[in-house]
Image: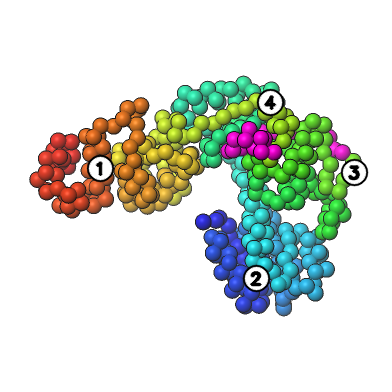
């Protein structure tokens, strides 16, 4: 599975370096490796990495110098230290200096994968919050939700009505439907619009890291906590905190969150004095939350605290009128990003997209259009520029169109068009593929008005 993240690996043991490079590349990350500390400093000066995985003890330039260079040039970069057993004391010092984590040699590869994944997720969270501020300025305080579907319009109207009430909200819907986008929309239409907005995926962190991210910690709360750190709940005071995948939150964390909502106060990890907070919570899940309560994985009392108002975002398959509108929105967006003069989507390509169930919803549609623009040579996205499995699926499935089952003639027309597209318009090859002679194909093309 493709993962997004740029990683720099620094280790003067060439075998260890090679093994780490292999593992991280296999995970799908973009990886740069070096066995020399001075080279690592130069690389950090030249480009920004999401995560730096570095040995602590090296000649000339050690891990601490690399950590300081990252903090100086790229504060968002997370640094993970690798250390031998004899230097664990030094590893604690690195945590005090701001390293994300340390890994002792000999290390287990599963641990490396886990820690790197958590660091990447933290970088993504910080970057998204920074980008959100830029988006707010760009759209003059408005978040764009592209829709012409009647049900979505009613949903947005309800969202606008409840936004100023300041009550907690639960959003439900499949992955990729835009739950985080809707939460930002509610925030910007609320009395908290001038306050901060933070988002966190509750399923992306271990219980320990999630607790630290949400509640923060006091100085000396644990080894390496040399300074006090505010959590996202405290930082979101007078604003909104979006809790995605809330049903993935561990039970012990649910109890702590329930207390924050009820008492409007929290305790930092290692703290003794409760702190007053003023936060609006918007939670979201793609699961059946009633099933998770029945199974005992999600607390009913927390559900009632969060579910003051419930908003369900329908899947894209239930609002097909939005597919062309969203397709052209993404077309304009990515054509500008890639600096390509692409302005159209062919009728056949749009027909395939419209008839596809779109299990990944808006996120998947965006990916399809972005891919089409990347592959297109002219100014039109054609059928050939769509994912291969999507093209095949469109032919072998039968779907209702506008509530009506397609006729045999309509299916035949769609199939002939697809075959012609696949063979680049070569009628002889198309006839062979269809299992008919060229004259029969010519008659069908004339019948359907496809001679040209």
Query: Earlier along the polypeptide chain: callout 1 or callout 4?
Result: 4
Magenta residues, as a range?
A: 274-296
- Relative image position of residue 133 (x, y in whole percent): 63, 41
Query: Earlier along the polypeptide chain: callout 2 or callout 1?
Result: 2
**Mark 2 or mark 4, which is nearer to you?**
4
User: How far apart are the alpha carbons under marks 3 and 1?
Assistant: 70 Å
Residue closer to the observer: 222 or 345 = 222
**Residue of label 1:** 415
Query: Earlier along the polypeptide chain: callout 2 or callout 4?
Result: 2
Residue closer to the observer: 332 or 303 = 303
Residue 287: which quarter of the image?
top right
Q: Is residue 123 above or below residue 7?
A: above
**Mark 3 or mark 1, which is nearer to you?**
1
Residue 308 is marked as: 4
Q: Quadrant of the C terminus?
A: top left
User: In the displayed structure, does residue 409 sit left or right of residue 227?
Assistant: left
Residue 272 is marked as: 3
User: Residue drawn at (25%, 32%), measured in percent from left and top?
Assistant: 407
- Relative image position of residue 82 (x, y in whole percent): 71, 68
User: In the displayed structure, does residue 350 sit left or right of residue 148?
Assistant: left
Could one spot residue 6 in this view of the protein? yes
Q: Is residue 168 above or below residue 63?
A: above
């Amino acid at each position: 599975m493709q993962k997004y993240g740029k990683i720099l690996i620094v280790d003067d043991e060439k075998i260890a370096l090679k093994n780490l490079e292999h593992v991280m590349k296999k995970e799908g990350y973009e990886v740069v490796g070096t066995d020399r500390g001075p080279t690592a400093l130069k690389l950090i000066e030249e480009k920004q990495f999401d995560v730096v995985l570095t040995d602590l003890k090296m000649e000339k330039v050690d891990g601490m110098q690399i950590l300081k260079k990252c903090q100086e040039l790229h504060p968002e970069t997370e640094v993970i230290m690798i250390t031998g057993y004899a230097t664990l004391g030094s590893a604690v010092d690195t945590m005090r200096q701001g390293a994300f984590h340390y890994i002792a040699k000999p290390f287990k590869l599963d641990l490396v994968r886990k820690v790197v994944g958590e660091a990447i997720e933290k970088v993504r969270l910080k970057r998204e919050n920074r980008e959100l501020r830029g988006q707010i300025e760009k759209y003059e305080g408005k978040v764009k939700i592209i829709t012409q579907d009647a049900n979505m319009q009613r949903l947005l109207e309800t969202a606008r009505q409840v936004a100023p009430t300041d009550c907690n909200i639960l959003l439900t819907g499949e992955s990729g439907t835009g739950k985080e986008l809707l939460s930002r929309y509610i925030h910007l239409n609320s009395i908290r619009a001038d306050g901060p907005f933070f988002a966190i995926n509750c399923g992306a962190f271990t219980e320990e890291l999630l607790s630290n991210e949400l509640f923060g910690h006091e100085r000396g709360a644990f080894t390496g906590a040399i300074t006090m750190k505010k959590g996202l709940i405290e930082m979101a005071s007078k604003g909104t905190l979006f809790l995605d995948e809330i049903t993935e939150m561990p039970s012990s964390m649910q109890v702590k969150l329930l207390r924050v909502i009820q008492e409007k106060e929290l305790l930092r990890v290692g703290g003794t004095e409760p702190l007053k907070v003023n936060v609006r919570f918007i939670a979201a899940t793609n699961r059946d939350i009633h099933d998770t309560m029945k199974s005992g994985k999600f607390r009913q009392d927390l559900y009632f605290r969060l579910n003051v108002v419930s908003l369900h975002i329908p899947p894209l398959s239930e609002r097909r009128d939005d597919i062309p509108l969203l397709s052209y929105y993404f077309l304009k967006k990515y054509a500008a990003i890639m600096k390509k003069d692409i302005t159209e989507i062919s009728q056949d390509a749009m027909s395939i997209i419209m008839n596809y169930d779109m299990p990944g919803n808006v996120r998947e549609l965006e990916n399809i259009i972005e891919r089409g623009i990347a592959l297109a040579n002219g100014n039109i996205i054609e059928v050939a520029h769509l994912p291969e499995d999507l093209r095949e699926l469109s032919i072998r499935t039968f779907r209702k169109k506008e509530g009506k089952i397609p006729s045999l003639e309509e299916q035949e027309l769609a199939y002939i068009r697809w075959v012609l597209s696949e063979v680049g318009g070569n009628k002889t090859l198309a006839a062979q593929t269809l299992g008919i002679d060229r004259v029969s194909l010519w008659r069908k093309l004339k019948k359907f008005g496809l001679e040209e």
